[in-house]
Each structure stands twice: as C-alpha cells, then as structure tokens.
C-alpha cells in the first residue's frame, strides 16, 4: 500500500503530491475499531469510568 | 435539566459553547468539502473550503487568547496527579489491588490527552492550510505558488492530508464518548452550560476544580 501520491516532473522524476487517499479507509477503520474495542471492554468489565 | 440554579455548577460558559459548536460546523464543512470530491462527489468545493478554513483559523486564535487570558489554561495541561491517577486506573483495569484513581479536576487525563492530540492536528492543518492559500485566487489576494519548491509543496500537502484524515479518527472517538450513556451528564453541559451539583461532587475533585455552588 502506498503512503504518498506522486506525479512525474518534466524531467521524469517523481514529485511528491501529498498523502495517499488509499489511507482514508484505514483512518476510518481505526475510529471504528476503537469504538468496538472500547465497547467490548466496557461490556466485559462493566465499569462506568472512561 | 430541571435543577434549581443553586444546584448547578457552570462547566462551559456561553462563549465557549458557541466556540465549540461553530468550530464543529467549520470542521464538518472542511471534512465534507475536502473528502467528498475525493469520494467522487463533484462540486465546486474550493471556495467553501478556504472560507471554512479561515473561519477555523480565526476561531482557534480566539480560543487560544480566551483560554490563556480568561479561562484556567492549566486545567487542560497534564500534571503529575493526572499521570498518577492514570497509572492507578490502568492498574485497576488490570485487576491490580491498590488505591482507586484520583478524581479529576475539570478535565480527566484522557480528555487532556485528546485535547493535546486534536490541538496538534488542527494547528498543523491551519498552518499548512494558510500556506495552501497561496495556490488559489480569491477576492482578497492573488495566487503565488512559487514561494515553495515542488517538493516543499508536496510535504505541505502530505502533512495537511494526513492531519485531515487523523481528524476523522479523532472525531469518531469524540462523538462516541459524547454519546455514551455514562458521559451524557457531561456532554449535555456543552449545550446547556452546566452540570448538577451531584455530578460535580461524584465525578470531580473539588480541590482540583473548586466551584462556588458545588462546594456548598
């Protein structure tokens, strides 16, 4: 998986454009995974704190 | 919600609540205008994006001044007691015996860590976003993209992109905690401004967050 977007310069060299948009699902997934893990932790422990 | 005024402890004053919700509108606008075109929704997004970005930058500047001059700046800074309490909380979660975690002041350790993370990300977004304004024409200025080399622009865009995607993760966690049933007493205060005296006493250490009504 590529982390960055590149284009070619007029000399044929790679030029950094920015971060790869293929990372977007990973950031969304990290948020979803956090919710799932925390919710399971709360159910298992039954604690009322953070 | 129907508590008498003497049973209330002010948690968020009106200017701070307005700041929070206007900032939320600006961030959602920025996320929508930033990511929907990438996901295939074609519309003229640039103007709305830079206007919302400037609004966010102005709000952040106001918040920094207000938090430094009028609010208790140190209430959001991680201190020794927070770290000690966090260590005790981890021990408790792992089933270790020992004293319970300390009650927090106005903000808990996790809230302070979250605030630190979102501060770093938003400041990076604002800084890179202001630089990116050099790439567009607006009624206020003309574009001048030659301030930086192609590589430098790539780095600026990469930082902006990564921070923008990080905001999505942080926002998901923020909304999740705000909607959890045991946090609603606190989330509600971002709308109505106050928490009950009972919540103040049960969730906070009055010595670390002294409040007139709550201390009575």
Image (cartoon, coloured by chain):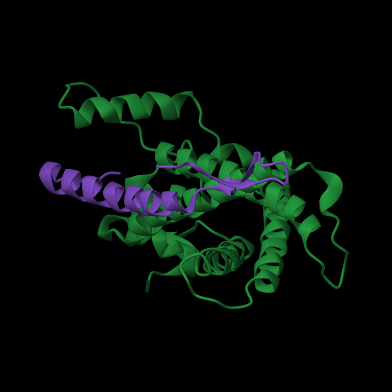
Q: Viewed as shown, does residue A50 lie left or right of B69?
A: left
As drawn, which residue projects farthest toward the bottom?
Answer: B43
Q: Identify the hue of chain A.
A: purple
The chain in green: B
Percent x, y for residue B141?
Answer: 88, 65
As drawn, which residue projects farthest toward the front?
Answer: A11
Of residues B38 and B32, the one drawn nearer to the viewer in this rendering: B38
Of residues B202 and B159, the one drawn nearer to the viewer in this rendering: B159
From the viewer's perspective, is residue B72 above or below residue B17?
above
Whether residue B123 is visible to the viewer of this picture, yes or no, is no
Q: Which residue is rendered at x = 47% and y = 71% of the image?
A: B40
Q: Viewed as shown, does residue B206 lie left or right of A40?
A: right
Q: Which residue is rendered at x = 44% and y = 44% of the image?
A: B111
Residue B47 picture quarter: bottom right
From the viewer's perspective, is residue A13 above or below residue B180?
above
Percent x, y for residue B173?
Answer: 37, 52
From the viewer's perspective, is residue B98 above or below residue A28?
above
| The N terminus of chain B lies in quadrant | bottom left
């Amino acid at each position: 998986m590529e982390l960055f977007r590149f284009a070619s310069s007029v000399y044929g060299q790679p030029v950094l454009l920015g971060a790869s948009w293929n990372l977007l699902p990973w950031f969304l997934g990290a948020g979803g995974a956090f919710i799932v893990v925390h919710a399971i932790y709360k159910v298992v422990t039954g604690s009322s704190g953070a | 919600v129907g508590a008498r005024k003497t049973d209330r402890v002010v948690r968020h004053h009106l200017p701070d609540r307005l700041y929070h919700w206007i900032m939320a509108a600006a961030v959602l606008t920025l996320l929508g205008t930033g990511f929907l075109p990438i996901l295939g929704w074609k519309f003229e997004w640039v103007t709305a994006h830079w206007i919302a970005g400037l609004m966010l930058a102005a709000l952040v500047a106001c918040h920094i001044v207000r938090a430094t001059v009028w609010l208790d700046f140190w209430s959001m800074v991680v201190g020794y007691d927070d770290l000690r309490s966090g260590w005790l909380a981890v021990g408790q979660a792992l089933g270790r015996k020992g004293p319970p975690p300390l009650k927090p002041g106005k903000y808990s350790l996790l809230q302070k860590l979250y605030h630190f993370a979102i501060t770093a990300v938003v400041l990076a977004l604002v800084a890179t976003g202001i630089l990116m304004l050099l790439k567009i024409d607006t009624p206020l200025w003309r574009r001048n993209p030659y301030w930086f080399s192609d590589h430098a622009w790539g780095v600026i865009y990469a930082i902006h992109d990564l921070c923008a995607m990080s905001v999505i993760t942080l926002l998901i966690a923020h909304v999740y905690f705000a909607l959890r049933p045991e946090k609603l007493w606190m989330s509600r205060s971002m709308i109505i401004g106050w928490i009950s005296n009972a919540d103040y006493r049960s969730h906070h250490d009055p010595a670390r967050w002294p409040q007139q009504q709550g201390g009575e």
